[in-house]
Image: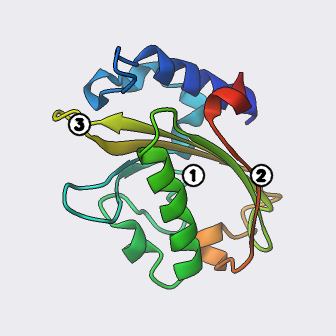
């Protein structure tokens, strides 16, 4: 999968924007999401009054070895606090932006290169509380562990920018 598929997802998300710049979760139509990306997508929620994210749904590629659906990020990654902190920073930054976040990272173990597109959505009260996340990675084989299986300690950020800059 390539950046072009992420750009397609971003364009669809952008088409849902309202005048105030937000994207209501209720406008999202799963049938219009790029099918090739579905295994690599997740929906996360930051419940009101909580400072943590819960996976509402995770695609099959993201659930390999552990299905995070219905679980909190920090519980899923309890044995890998550095990786949980890394994702929390990205998720919070994306949630509080109106533009989302595009990032590229290298890890010393697991898939060596990961691209993420993280897009905020609002709930019925108009508050940003949901994220659509798509994670693309290359693995030479299924024997190569995923980051949550390999416990990365060193994470090298290559790119962190708005999706509009990275994907246009």
Q: How many marks?
A: 3
CA gap between label 3 and label 2 equals 33 Å
Q: Quick one: label 3 or label 2, which is nearer the N terminus?
A: 3
Instruction: Count residues near mark 3 (Cα–Cα under 10 Å), then give few for <14, some for 14-19, many for 20+.
Output: some
Which is in the foreground here, disc 3 or disc 1? 3
Quarter of the image holding residue 80?
bottom right
Q: Is residue 45 above or below residue 65?
A: above
Q: Quick one: label 1 or label 2, which is nearer the N terminus?
A: 1
CA gap between label 1 and label 2 equals 11 Å
Left or right of residue 164: residue 88: left
Residue denoted by label 3: 123
Give x and y (percent) for residue 33.
Answer: 48, 25
The color scheme shown is rainbow
Residue 61 has which mark? 1
Residue denoted by label 2: 138
CA gap between label 3 and label 1 equals 26 Å
Instruction: Count residues near mark 1 (Cα–Cα under 10 Å), then give few for <14, some for 14-19, many for 20+.
Output: some
């Amino acid at each position: 999968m390539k950046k072009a598929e992420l750009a397609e997802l971003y364009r669809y998300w952008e088409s849902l924007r309202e005048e105030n710049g937000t994207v209501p979760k209720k406008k999202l139509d799963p049938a219009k999401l790029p099918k090739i990306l579905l295994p690599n997508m997740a929906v996360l929620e930051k419940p009101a009054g909580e400072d943590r994210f819960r996976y509402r749904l995770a695609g099959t590629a993201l659930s390999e070895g552990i299905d995070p659906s219905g679980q909190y990020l920090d519980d899923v990654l309890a044995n890998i606090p550095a990786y949980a902190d890394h994702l929390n920073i990205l998720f919070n930054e994306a949630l509080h932006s109106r533009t989302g976040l595009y990032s590229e990272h290298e890890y010393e173990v697991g898939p060596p290169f990961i691209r993420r597109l993280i897009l905020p959505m609002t709930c019925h009260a108009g508050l940003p509380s949901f994220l659509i996340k798509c994670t693309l990675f290359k693995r030479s084989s299924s024997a190569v562990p995923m980051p949550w299986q390999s416990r990365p300690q060193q994470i090298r950020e290559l790119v962190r920018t708005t999706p509009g800059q990275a994907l246009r």
